[in-house]
Image (cartoon, rainbow, N blue to C red):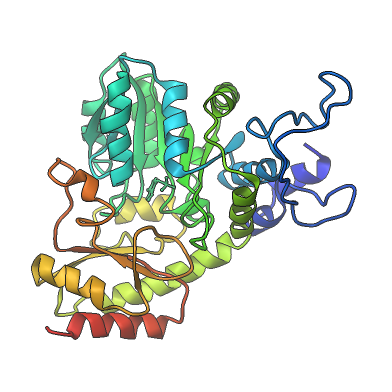
Amino acid sequence: MSEQQQHITKSGFETRAIHAGYEPDPTTGAVIPPIYATSTYKQDGVGGLRGGYEYSRSANPTRTALEGVLAALEEGEKGFAFASGLAAEDTLVRTTCRPGDHVVIPDDAYGGTYRLFDKVEQAWGVEHSPAAVSDVDAVRAAIQPGRTKLVWIETPTNPLLNIGDIEALAAVAHDAGALLVVDNTFASPYLQQPLTLGADAVVHSTTKYVGGHSDVVGGALVVRDLDLAEQVTFHQNAIGAVPGPFDAFLTHRGVKTLGVRMDRHCDNAERIVEFLTGHPSIAQVIYPGLEEHPGHAVASRQMKRYGGMISFRVTGGEAQALAVCERTEVFTLGESLGGVESLIEHPGRMTHASVAGTELEVPADLVRLSVGIETVEDLLADLERALSAGA
Ligand SMILES: Cc1ncc(COP(=O)(O)O)c(C=O)c1O
């Protein structure tokens, strides 16, 4: 790492987001990493690689720049970019687990993560037990000594926004000889840096806040330890679920504004929580920033702010939840989250349909908001209209 990059690694978050992992191109001075649309690289004699580049599954300079900034933001040893969040998850499981091993997962994990463990990893001999991330004793009890290789958490969880105590859960995992993996998608590295609290690996769906513009699917892993980094490097190349340079470029462009976007997501979410609390059509507002949220104290300790995701339950049951989702105009009805535009969805029928009928099923009267960065008055008026129509 150059002296300038070493200096940047110690800078503030926004400086790292803009400058870490890349220095202006030595030949042209390009301040933004070029899109290296190439699958292979000329060698100066057999094995004479320029900058270590041999073939773009193994490494590509546009991806390298993204991986560098991700590591700097999460304060990890090394970052890795993938074609999707689930590709990152699968690569980490295959790196760290073998048939017969066991993983503890959140009892309200993102539906796709649950499906990956339940329908894919299990068929290859890696078993899982769900436990509530907010209950340290329940996670400890779910560990199978000698077999559990990973304690896998999300915090906040998707969509119930439960909070796991990263420091306490890292201690529980390490006592059992397991690694703590934190899916940091909902918080983003701006609000929370799990590796600094003892986690061993961070997973992202960069499709969400990290990319931030709903224009690219991607995933990331960042690890704290050099040995694990080497093993992930091997598996990333051996499995090959990597993003192309165009996707890496788009994700990297999004990263630069992560800090300012997250602050606006949080500002808008706080105003909406205030509006929803006490609204006659709302039975419960779920947001870690609320004092009555059971994870509020832990969230206050480990997060800078409480994020842009809000879930709420309506008084009129599933029918009203579906109607609200269909009535908003500024909030777009759609899956995913973390983009600049506000989204609304019904987890039970949409993002979490894959856990219907399992112990991870979510309430039917639940609505999830991904609060964007639009003018907050427009978001409030939109929700007011959708909640009062037909009430
Ligand atoms: C918390 C969380 N983790 C992982 C994923 C999977 O990421 P991707 O859709 O990029 O594969 C998602 C997707 O919604 C998610 O919400």
Question: At 74% from the left edge and 33% from the top edge, which residue is drawn?
Answer: 40
Residue 308 appears in the rendering: yes
Residue 94: x percent and y percent?
Answer: 43, 24
Residue 258: x percent and y percent?
Answer: 56, 60
In terms of depth relative to the viewer, which is nearer, 288 or 324?
324
Question: At 26% from the left edge and 32% from the top edge, which residue is drawn?
Answer: 118
Residue 125: x percent and y percent?
Answer: 30, 18
| Vertical order, 292 against 386 (above or below) | above
- Residue 225: quadrant of the picture: top right
| Vertical order, 35 against 2 (above or below) | below
- Residue 9: quadrant of the picture: top right
| Vertical order, 309 against 268 (above or below) | above
In terms of depth relative to the viewer, which is nearer, 183 or 138?
183
Identity of the residue furthest to the left in this view: 316
Question: At 57% from the left edge and 42% from the top edge, which residue is drawn?
Answer: 243
Residue 290 appears in the rendering: no
Left or right: 284 in relation to 270:
left
Residue 110: x percent and y percent?
Answer: 31, 46
Q: Which quarter of the rendering shows the C terminus?
A: bottom left
Question: At 48% from the left edge and 68% from the top edge, which residue is drawn?
Answer: 340
Q: Which quarter of the rendering shows the N terminus?
A: top right
